[in-house]
Image (cartoon, rainbow, N blue to C red):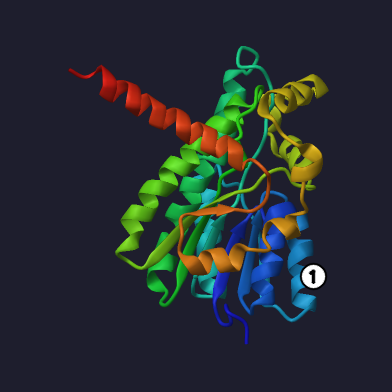
Amino acid sequence: MGEYQGKTAVITGAGSGLGAAMAELFAGEGARVALLDIDGERAAAKAEELRANGTEAIAIRVDVADKTSVEAAAQAVQVKFGACDVLCANVGVQQFGAIDKLTDHDWDWVMSVNFRGVVNTVSAFMPLLRASEGQRHVLLTASASYFQLGARMAAYVASKFAVVGYGEVLRQELAEEGINVAMMFPAGMMTRHIESSMAARPEELGPSRFDQSDIAAMIASSDVDTAADLATAEDAVSNLLAELRSGEPYIITHGSYRHQVEAQQSRVLDAFARMEEAKP
């Protein structure tokens, strides 16, 4: 009997990478799993793999930027499983580029998926979460980029800041209902993130651009130790169950950027000190 025996976990971006690792984790604890992804074929293949190992699993192709698509997925989960106990709003597309090179299409696409996609997902599954009993969790995938800023990532970083702000308020509003909201901050991983981002971009917006000079600028500006900080998706979720059990709001998966968080907080406290000193 696993910790999530008889429970239902719904995971977006579950066809590969971090989402697939989450699906494996909850399945291993006895949960029924709904795998949602814009890449329906990969989600179906992962669901079939889980079913072969004894897990009740379904795959649903969904575009989280399309509210109607997510609502249809929620209805399908209700019909199949009748519940949602864990909702993992795990999504993130990437468009590198200097701020003056990012187009309106770039901004609209990244924000519509990374931020509005989270909002759409939570809104669609909230009735199922509220109808369930016992421990319930909403897990939002933010990014280590929230703390570990880098050049050429303005659209992505801004979208993840929006996710954290939304998550903070969502946590406050759902606390009295006994629904835990946590935000995960994964650092670099050995996944298909860039490949899946490029594939997910709508054709009408033009191809997703990928320039090695942007990657070099990002690494040079962000104090990233790529060799030390890179992890597999499975490693990244290894402490997830314990973190959800703790009920704490922030989940650090891996990475050696603690000094950057401390430096950021120090600058904020210094600003308070300057303000207080300047007051008569």
Instruction: Report helix, strand or loop for mark 1.
Output: helix
Q: Residues within 10 Å of mark 1 (few under 14, many from 20)?
A: some
- Residue 98: give x, y in percent of width and height: 66, 17
Q: Is residue 49 visible?
A: yes
Q: Is residue 15 above or below residue 210?
A: below
The one nearer the camera, 115 or 234, is 234
Quarter of the figure that contains the N terminus: bottom right
Circle 1 sits on which residue? 49
- Residue 140: give x, y in percent of width and height: 53, 52
Instruction: State the image quarter where residue 28 is shown.
Output: bottom right
Question: For the point 74% across and 44% down, which residue is it?
Answer: 229
Residue type for callout 1: Glu
What residue occupies the far top of the structure in this picture?
100
Q: Is residue 19 above or below residue 270?
A: below
- Residue 225: give x, y in percent of width and height: 75, 37
194 to the left or right of 73: right
Question: For the point 72% across and 38% down, which residue is it?
Answer: 197
Instruction: State the image quarter where residue 226 is shown.
Output: top right
264 to the left or right of 152: left
The one nearer the camera, 108 or 248, is 248
What residue occupies the far left of the structure in this picture?
280
Question: For the point 54% across and 38% down, which residue is it?
Answer: 261
Q: Is residue 24 above or below residue 187?
A: below
Quarter of the figure that contains the C terminus: top left
177 to the left or right of 50: left
- Residue 148: give x, y in percent of width and height: 61, 34
Q: Is residue 208 visible?
A: no
The one nearer the camera, 67 or 258, is 258
The one nearer the camera, 116 or 245, is 245
